Amino acid sequence: MSAARALAGSLPFAGLRVVELCDTPAGEQLGKLVADLGGEVVKVEPPGGVASRRHGPFRTGPDGVPTEESLAFVAYNSSKRSVVLDDGEAGRALRDRLVAGADVLLTTGSPRELAAAGLDLDALVEQHERLVVVSTSPFGLTGPWKDYLTSDLVGLAAGGPLASCGYDDHSIPPILPGGGQAFQTAASFGYCGLLLALIEREQSGRGQLVDVSMHEANAVSGELANPYWFYPKAIVQRQTCRHAQPVPTQPALFQCADDVWVYFALILAEQRSWKALVAWMDEVGLADDLGDPAYDDLAHRQANFPHVQEMLDVFFMLQTSEDAYSEGQRRGLPIGPLRAFEDLPHDEHLVARSFFVDVADDDGTVTTLPGLPYRFSAFAAEPGPAPRLGADQGLVTA
């Protein structure tokens, strides 16, 4: 059974047996989504463990000294089980026995890597009628790039999203977003594919092979770049902290008195937002000439935006980011502070919804993890700890 904690009701994947043969975050995140909702996800690792166990940064122990426990591994492998199998004949036989008793097999290897490991996914689906296999590979199981290597950066670059990420100054190359976005995107598509295959199995009684390409997942996730190219044949340009557009839009970042920046998506064409902003600035004595009826005309606002920008720079510099955020929201204006991740556990809204949870390992070590990003009225769950290497070896030796 999963190490996830059921707080109420029955978890939807309870009783679902999953074997995970994954060595990238795309597959590990997919397995986590299943394990956190009750699926028994058995992670098969080579001697020494999967590569993600050695990716920094590492967790700090109670004495303040860094341990060898990877935070990436802890985050992507919550609620799972771990067994260790070598790639010899005996290890492969035990792996095949696990797969034979599973509902789902998750893999991330390229066709060449799968063949080297003695895995024929089509044959497995034929051999095990109800088995659902989800392959979340770099470029899919077919095509001229099927055996190419990848990384998160390669995935975003080759798939297109990276061209829209960066600054107004195009002499600066595109900037890689953090957090493994290419892998996360592939994992989301893999999760959708798995759910659809399980629904199909409920109706037909048969499993199938789901072939998810990280390259294709990113190629359909290019935000505005895709529709602008498909319809008016326009090419978008990356902009600092704004959506890439065919033509530059006005800056949206403003520094506040507490040195925290806020994002304010002022759309000049929206008359209601403009009126609300000017009324707010007038109440604090900073509207100056912006209350002039001439500014009711959109063309006048656009022609004089450099002046508007200067006024907004002063307006935000005279208040804290929290004051600007709360007052702007109260007035229906889309304003929000730019928070670092380390600030999020203290976010008032996330705290009120108990989003972050403390998860205790077998040895009592407590790690704060993001909780589930959704709420269901029928059940509630929290993630369990990531497994120690080989902690569940009894699953293959019993």
Image (cartoon, grey):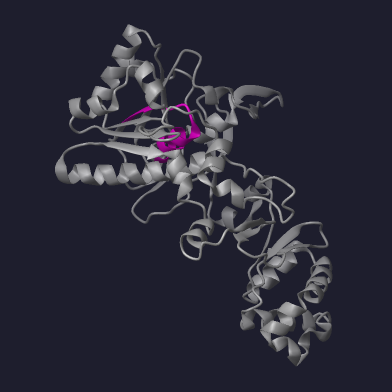
Give the number of marks.
0
Q: Quadrant of the C terminus?
A: top left
Residue 351 highlighted magenta (yes or no): no
- Image coordinates for residue 71, horizontal then vertical, percent: 59, 31
Q: Position of residue 20 (x, y in %)?
A: 38, 28
Seen in the picture, residue 4 relative to 63 is either above or below; the reply is below
Question: Outermost residue, front direction?
Answer: 233
State which quadrant residue 177 falls in: top right
Let me know if residue 171 appears in the view. yes
Q: Residue furthest top?
A: 89
Residue under the point 84% across and 70% down? 314
Magenta-drawn segment = 18-33
Residue extending furthest left?
Answer: 204
Q: Is residue 69 left or right of residue 299?
A: left
Percent x, y of residue 201 = 20, 41
Residue 5: % across, % down:
42, 39
Q: Nearer the viewer, residue 355 or 188?
A: 188
In which quadrant of the rendered image does the N terminus lie? top left
Residue 11 shows in this picture: no
Relative to 226, does residue 275 appear above or below in the rendering? below
For the view shown, which residue lies furthest in the bottom direction? 293
Q: Would you say 302 lies left or right of 212 here?
A: right
Asked whether 125 or 153 is in front, the reply is 153
Magenta region includes residue 20: yes
Q: Nearer the viewer, residue 134 or 215?
A: 215
